[in-house]
Amino acid sequence: MKYLIAFFSFFICAVPSFAQTDSVIMRNIADEILLRGTCYDDLHDLCKNIGNRLSGTKEAEKAVLWAKKKLEALHPDKVWLQPVTVPVWTRGKESLSIRYPGSGDFKNMNMLSLGNSQGTGGKPLTAEVVMVQDIEELKSLSEADAKGKIVFFNHRFPQELVNTFEGYGRTARYRSTAPNVASLKGAAGVIIRSVSTGMDDEPHTGAMRYADSVNKIPAVAIGNISADALEAACEKGTVTARLQSECTLNGTANSYNVIAEITGSEKPEEIVLVGGHLDSWDVGEGAHDDGAGITQAIEVISVLKALNLKPKRTIRAVLFMNEENGLRGGHAYADSAKARNEKHILAIESDAGGFSPRGFGTEMEPAQRQKIKQYAPLFFDYGVYHFDVEEGGADISPLHNVGVPAMALLPDPQRYFDYHHTHADVFEKVNHRELKLGAIVMAQMAYLIATHGL
Amino acid sequence: MKYLIAFFSFFICAVPSFAQTDSVIMRNIADEILLRGTCYDDLHDLCKNIGNRLSGTKEAEKAVLWAKKKLEALHPDKVWLQPVTVPVWTRGKESLSIRYPGSGDFKNMNMLSLGNSQGTGGKPLTAEVVMVQDIEELKSLSEADAKGKIVFFNHRFPQELVNTFEGYGRTARYRSTAPNVASLKGAAGVIIRSVSTGMDDEPHTGAMRYADSVNKIPAVAIGNISADALEAACEKGTVTARLQSECTLNGTANSYNVIAEITGSEKPEEIVLVGGHLDSWDVGEGAHDDGAGITQAIEVISVLKALNLKPKRTIRAVLFMNEENGLRGGHAYADSAKARNEKHILAIESDAGGFSPRGFGTEMEPAQRQKIKQYAPLFFDYGVYHFDVEEGGADISPLHNVGVPAMALLPDPQRYFDYHHTHADVFEKVNHRELKLGAIVMAQMAYLIATHGL
């Protein structure tokens, strides 16, 4: 494509009277971040010098200190660490091999144990595979069909949905449901087709949780290519799987949320929160999930300082710990806010990847949503047009549960579930301009609400 | 991000009465392509088994036969080749090395000659470098400053613009202007900072054209990292460049546009065109530019056949030859349409990369644009919301110049100019769902207009 595109600013006529000053400040925020923003460099630093950072690991603690140092270097009004007790889950060694129908040999298959899963104690678990296509078929298995077997839960991601988060919502619930149902049927283990849009063989880990009443059977994920092969094999004849894994929960450890704020000049007691989560799974580099969100939150503080913007209300960046396998940071933050009687007027979370922003989800009263939507025309030129999704964020859900309006940055969702919770979620999968645009619109929204209230 | 997103379909109330049938067909098109579409596999085949395909090369001819075969396999009503005479430009060997201030040695620098540029005849051209920041500074150079020198045209891509195509429009014009102005000043050659958003060292080639009156001095591009180094060196002291290249124009060759159509059931004489260009530059794999567009155009034919949709008006896929360095295919097509007295009611081009679609640009009468915008609510759930950019496409510009309404598929523009015309424009940079979504909305739009007219 060769020619210049000319934009028509037809939306401007619909903007309320405060728009002119606001739109200039929004433009300044965008210029500063696109030309001199550091979130992309910060993400490189985090991904390459610390890497993945599951709660309770030394990498997570390095990430805490890294974030504190980054924020302190910006000289906001306050920076502090908030204690969080996190579960400690360790993966250890793990492997899965498959004996195909009519073959004597076991062949290795890519896999990842699901987070919080119990392993096989490092010993081989060898059993026949029984395939089911969905939860109904699993529930309808007789105990004789399932007892002692390894259930292959072959539920596919609904690729036909344009909004992959809807597909994720429909599919990811079975990461916990399938192992629990299989255990109740007497199964010895579970292999699930990954919750993945990928046309590849990446296994996707992710949290599962055992019900109190069930035996904790091992649960692992395999990539789509392996799942296709396993499906074909199960249709052909008897398949045996050999699973060996050491993963286990090992009590708790001390960790922290990392928090910084620029105190409001007129109403310091009213807080606009921007955040993401500092922890990641123990594979890849946690680049999109959620290195993106936390470097964007740091960028919000950075751009306010660079432009010497002094918001009327407090803007606070919160880098939560333990979103992935416990949400302890989100709960600790909400508990602390309650104990300190803090008034949050809005909490914005970025935890859907560092892709081009397209909207903001809102979980709030209709009148508040309407007020947010007044600003929609101001965001149009930044590619953000969609304000009609009801969505907040995991870390801010404990705040929302006690009445705080919650908001999610909604980036383009097409690529996220190719990388999510995999070895492939690395820095190289993040585009510098897309990441920065997310930071821009989050800073713009935080500044608007800190200026005008909600 | 963990939770389900629920969409509000608030837009539906605004849709005209034809919407219900249309929206069902649009949904069927989306399901078919997302679940069984072949554009991503086709792109893999094109990129990996043919690769880049500059007009006049044997790879371009392979691509012609490949496309014809692909289209014939879909059994549309017609498939044919339309002759196009194309220029033949060959790159040959090329190198650039730099002697930095205070150093005796020349060090190699990544580079690509600009397309259609004349080389050094394979002999070394060694000259002092004179740096200018923009076209005004170049124009203000005295002949004494420029004569016999190699001009380094250090104009930066305006990263602060959200719409990178606007930045490209402002910058790419100098690929031709700078060499011509430098030549008039007596310069011996030109090095330009690539027209690139990339934070890397990829040089970006692209077309340049000598004015009739000037000496054809060599013109080459370097990547942003090399340009930063060269800038720093020029600020420090005397820099010498040694350029050696064999590129040259070698007359013309015979080639083809590849065309397929599904003939309209009620008004076959009215044609809705969908297209992209089959040729690429001679580096990388031409994946986004424009393998994406042509595999999407093939997908439009494919989905109509798969769903047994019989459009009232003719839908024609045109895979143009020689967009990159001549636009001969676009002219040949428009000439043929005129000679055959064909009536095109709309021409849609996809040539801005295989990224998530966000809108359609329109170059047409206001009443036609208004008619197109009536359909906007139907596209909202497919991520397409922006209909207010005045944009058509290069290949369809000769048609537009004789009155045909032109339309551009507008994907998200953030990543395109990282890869455009580089070694990095390869299949792996294309996401399967993003590519398919572009094909979906192009097929939907073509079907709507073929049904309702324009």
Image (cartoon, coloured by chain):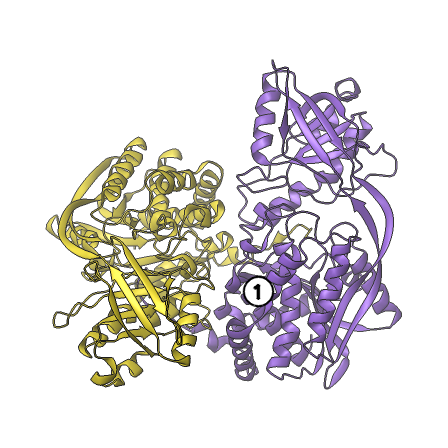
Chain colours: A yellow, B purple
Q: Is residue A347 left or right of residue A184?
A: right
From the viewer's side, name the closer residue of A279 and A383: A279
From the viewer's side, name the closer residue of B108 and A321: B108
Q: How many residues crowd mark 1 within 10 Å: few (<14), some (14–19), many (20+)?
A: many
| Residue B451 screen position, x and y as percent | 66, 81
Q: Residue at x 74, y 73 (%)?
A: B260
Q: Residue at x 60, y 80 (%)?
A: B306
Q: How many marks?
A: 1
Q: Is residue A49 left or right of residue B200?
A: left
Q: Quadrant of residue B144?
A: top right
> Given the image, what chain letter belongs to the residue carrying mark 1?
B
| Residue B137 screen position, x and y as percent | 69, 27
Q: Is residue A153 left or right of residue B318?
A: left
Q: Residue at x 64, y 72 (%)?
A: B300
Please say whether residue A382 is visible from this viewpoint. Answer: yes
Please say whether residue B334 is visible from this viewpoint. Answer: no
Is residue A127 shown above or below B168?
Answer: below
Is residue B171 shown above or below A200?
Answer: above
Is residue B186 shown above or below B41?
Answer: above
| Residue B8 screen position, x and y as percent | 39, 72
Residue that numbered label 1 is attached to: B40
Question: SS at mark 1?
Answer: helix
| Residue B282 screen position, x and y as percent | 70, 48
Task: Specify the quadrant that holds the C terminus of chain B.
Answer: bottom right
Q: Residue furthest top?
A: B102
Q: Quadrant of residue A237?
A: bottom left
Q: Amino acid at mark 1?
A: Tyr
Task: Specify the quadrant that holds the N terminus of chain B.
Answer: bottom left
